[in-house]
Image: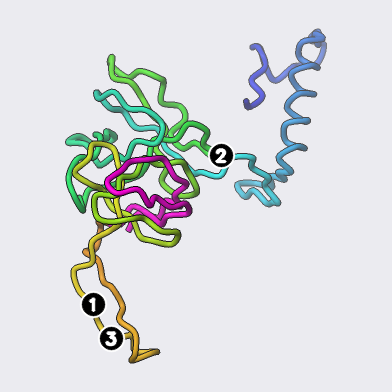
Amino acid sequence: MAFTPDKPFPKQAGDVIRSKDWTDAIEEVQRLDTAKVNKVGDDITGPLNIAGRVLAENFASGMELEPGDVVCMGPDEGTVVISGQRDDGLVMGVVSSEPGLLLNSALVDVVGGVPVFPIALCGRVPCKVVAENGPIERGDLLASSSTSGHAMKATSVLQVQDPDDPSKQVELHRAGTILGKAVGSLSELPGTGVIEVFVTAR
């Protein structure tokens, strides 16, 4: 949490400095030292050590979401809805439980009575998956499925010859439908599960 000492601040000559002010300042120094952040003007130089593995952003949703759910863009800006259509071009990310970096963090937990959720936009996150389009293996590209909140192995729309190796075929997918890449696997048919996914929507 950033350093936000009680007002009035900054201190003026002759003002009393309370022990709480010193404690807040020391805690902020320790936080910055732990993160190894050096700020010069408007630039931040690293290394920046982050415990989490996900870059997420807060979005509002009137639906009941939970970590691991696949979500798509909602009807209004700044909103998301749970996925439920195969190869949906509006697929956006996965609900995260422990984001490393949270964008739009000033957005409160509830906006106008609508809950807010951290949506993983990039990085590694647990994700609900289903073997709706066959088994999922490590490295498979993933897309939304007809199973609510679950990803499946992405469906290719075309196979072309690999220009670097004519003996191989390259699968092409419809732009905008790819959620990310499977880090884990799901072999049960039919079946559902939760695996690690590297979110790279494209």
Marking on residue 193? none
Q: Nearer the viewer, residue 79 or 187?
A: 187
Q: Nearer the viewer, mark 1 or mark 2?
A: 1
What span is in magenta? 178-202
Image-quadrant location for residue 81: top left
Which of the marked residues, 1 or 2, is nearer the chain's N terminus? 2
Q: Residue at x 69, y 51 (%)?
A: 46
Mark 3 residue type: Gln
Taking the image as shown, residue 81 lies to the left or right of residue 27, namely: left
Question: Alpha-carbon distance for marks 1 and 3?
Answer: 7 Å
Q: Nearer the viewer, residue 64 or 107?
A: 64
Mark 2 residue type: Gly
Report the residue marked by disc 1. 159
Q: Secondary structure at mark 2?
A: loop
Q: Is residue 177 above or below residue 64?
A: below
1 and 2 marks in contact (CB < 8 Å): no
Q: Residue at x 35, y 18 (%)?
A: 110
Q: Is residue 126 above or below residue 109?
A: below
